[in-house]
Image: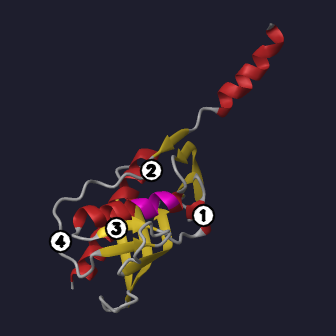
Amino acid sequence: MFRYIPLVLVLAACGTDQRYLIDPPQVAGSARVQVATLEVRDVSLPAYAEASEILVEGPDGGLSPIQNALWADDPVRAMTLAIAEQVAAGSSATVAPEPWPLQEDAQAEVTVTVAQLVAQADGTLRMTGQYALSSYDRIVRERIVPFSIAQPMRDNSPNAVAAATGAAISQLSADIIGSLAR
């Protein structure tokens, strides 16, 4: 019986990671946009942001994982779904992530490329990059729009990083809605 105790202790030690959701705040309202349907392409993230570890910047500028803290979902999938849900909730469009699930193609698509997503040592989460709006039938003017979003964090805890990431996604989604409304 005692020979199983080390195995139990090893298994217990492996299960101590906490998982955190990217959960943007709820969007209020519904802006009229120029398209009825929109496909959100998979978000492109830098390699360090695709990892399951939640990273924070140290005083020397290096990125280090927060001990025992992981994202609850694959970051690309989580961000893509969050943007699709936010744009759908805040606009008149029917929105879905790729692959487009309906028989008829979406009228437009948005491709988000994140260049930087860092929980900075100064207590700010910074997300920069660009998004591209494209439309096969030219329903919307095709364009590439740069973004630079900064969200304050109360501290460098995983909860604070997750909340700031959600707020940044919400702000980006609002920017996308604004572009589609013009």
Q: Are marks 3 and 2 in contact (CB under 8 Å)?
A: no
Q: Nearer the viewer, mark 3 or mark 2?
A: 3
Q: Is residue 164 visible?
A: yes
Question: Of helix, strand and loop, which one carries label 3?
Answer: strand
The circle drawn on residue 156 is 2
Question: Of helix, strand and loop, which one carries label 4?
Answer: loop
Give the quadrant of residue 17: top right
In this view, the residue in front, 58 or 81, is 81
Q: Earlier in the sequence, mark 4 or mark 3?
A: 4
Residue denoted by label 4:
31
Q: Nearer the viewer, mark 4 or mark 2?
A: 4
Q: Earlier in the sequence, mark 3 or mark 1?
A: 1
Q: Earlier in the sequence, mark 3 or mark 2?
A: 3
Question: Of helix, strand and loop, which one carries label 1?
Answer: helix
Point out the stretch of residues depicted in magenta. 77-81
Q: Is residue 123 visible?
A: no
The circle drawn on residue 95 is 3
**Which residue extends farthest top?**
1
Residue beneath the point at 60% across and 57% down: 51
**Which residue extends farthest right?**
3
Residue denoted by label 1:
48
